[in-house]
Amino acid sequence: MEEQEKKNYNRKTNWNIRPYLAVGLTSFLVIAASILFFFLVYRYHGIAQLMDQTSLILQPITIGLVLAYLVTPIVNFEERCLMPLAQEKIKNKWKAKRLVRGISVAGALLFVAVIIGVLLQMVIPELYRSINGLIGTLPRQVNSFMEWLNDYVSSDSNISGYLETALTKGTEIFEDWAQTEFLPQSKNILAGLTSGVIIVVKMVFNVVIGIIISIYVLMSKEAFVGQGKKVVYALFSGKKANVIIHTVHKSNEIFGGFISGKMLDSLIIGILCFICLYFMKMPYSVLVSVIVGVTNVIPFFGPYLGAIPSAILIMLASPLKGLYFIIFILVLQQVDGNIIGPKILGDSTGLSSFWVVFAILLFGGLFGIPGMIIGVPVFAVIFYIIKRILDYILKRKQLPRDTRSYIYAKKLDLETNTLVSEPKKEPEQKPKREKQKVENNKRK
């Protein structure tokens, strides 16, 4: 007992503060460096302008890389189907592979172009008919509203006086705004329209250049992969390089599974929406189905973002059908979230519902709609990397790596290096008299 007390006393008196100082200093330096980086990026306009200019210059390359990544599964599928046929006709394997690769790339890009063309062919005529319908029905709706308002106002002189005063005041405000705001800013409005046209032309040019870049990337994708691995193995040790390459493979698996699964899920939802709306005889069924299917690519919030304008559009034609459409969308999204989505996506991201919402809000606030689309797989990769780091640290400390072991953990026993769980509370035993009373009541 005395020896144990001496050990405990020595352990208390020989407390070393250096590790805590090192952790505190490291944390301080990391926070200070983060604040300095934030200040340089967002406060120093030179760096911000340089980053914006660089992103604009590299926009065609970004479009090409994204397009190549999205089209790669289609190219791989076509190669698997065409390669046996090409090897039977062409003896030279290298020539057969290059020929199949060229046909596969052209076929994949043609497939994407056909899909976009079909969507535009479905949307543009429907949108034109919708606008014409609104233009045709809106005057009648306005006239009926004005007739109802006149009948209601004629029965109450006070309301007519208030409306006349409000109309006069509103006319004065509109004339003042037109003279002071609209007319002086007309030159700026025309300049803005001109710059908007220029931006659209530049965007089309960047898309064309991006398509050309995607062709080069797809034709030599193995060479780019090999160059990337070569750089990693040259800069890092073998163990670190293996970890980096494994993380990249896992990231590609998460991204590929999420994007392809989400596209298939959105296609199914769009088709189901069109079939149901067609049998329900809803107006603008094609346009609404395309909107719902496209916005379904955004997890969690996407279906509701597409349902809001669609419901407004239907309500303008028929308020009762608009209400039916809202009920239908709620049912459809429950079916998608509980049945279709889990079957297709499975657990491709490894994130719980809380982290999915967190990723959408964070990346959506930082990068807008594109951030909401890619936020979930990006955060899933970050979550996976953090999990691997924590598993490695816990393994070095010889501690359990599963989360369940820490739920009821109270402390860590430093001598045995094991987690001590909280004792389970046993139910209080009733006194003998109360037990006897219960037994007597049962007998009666």
Image: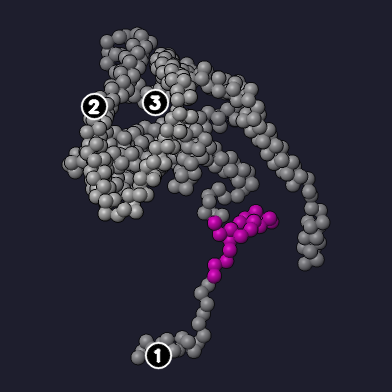
Left or right? Give the position of 133 relative to 208: left
Q: Mark 2 points at which residue?
A: 125
Give the camera-side residue of 425 and 315.
315
Q: Which amino acid, mark 3?
A: Leu
Left or right? Give the position of 145 relative to 252: left
Depicted 199 relative to depicted 392: above or below: above
Q: Name the residue under label 1.
A: 440
Crowd class of label 2 (few under 14; some 14 to 19; many from 20; radius 10 Å): few
- Which quadrant: the N terminus? bottom right
- The dot on residue 117 is none
Residue 250 at what x, y percent from top left? 48, 33
Dot in front, 1 or 3: 3
Dot in front, 1 or 2: 2
Give the camera-side residue of 56 and 99.
56
Q: Which of marks 3 and 2 is nearer the N terminus?
A: 3
Q: Which of marks 1 and 2 is nearer the N terminus?
A: 2
Specify start and end residues of the magenta stretch as a single range: 407-425
Q: Which amino acid, mark 1?
A: Asn
Q: Which of the 4 image quadrants contains residue 211?
A: top left
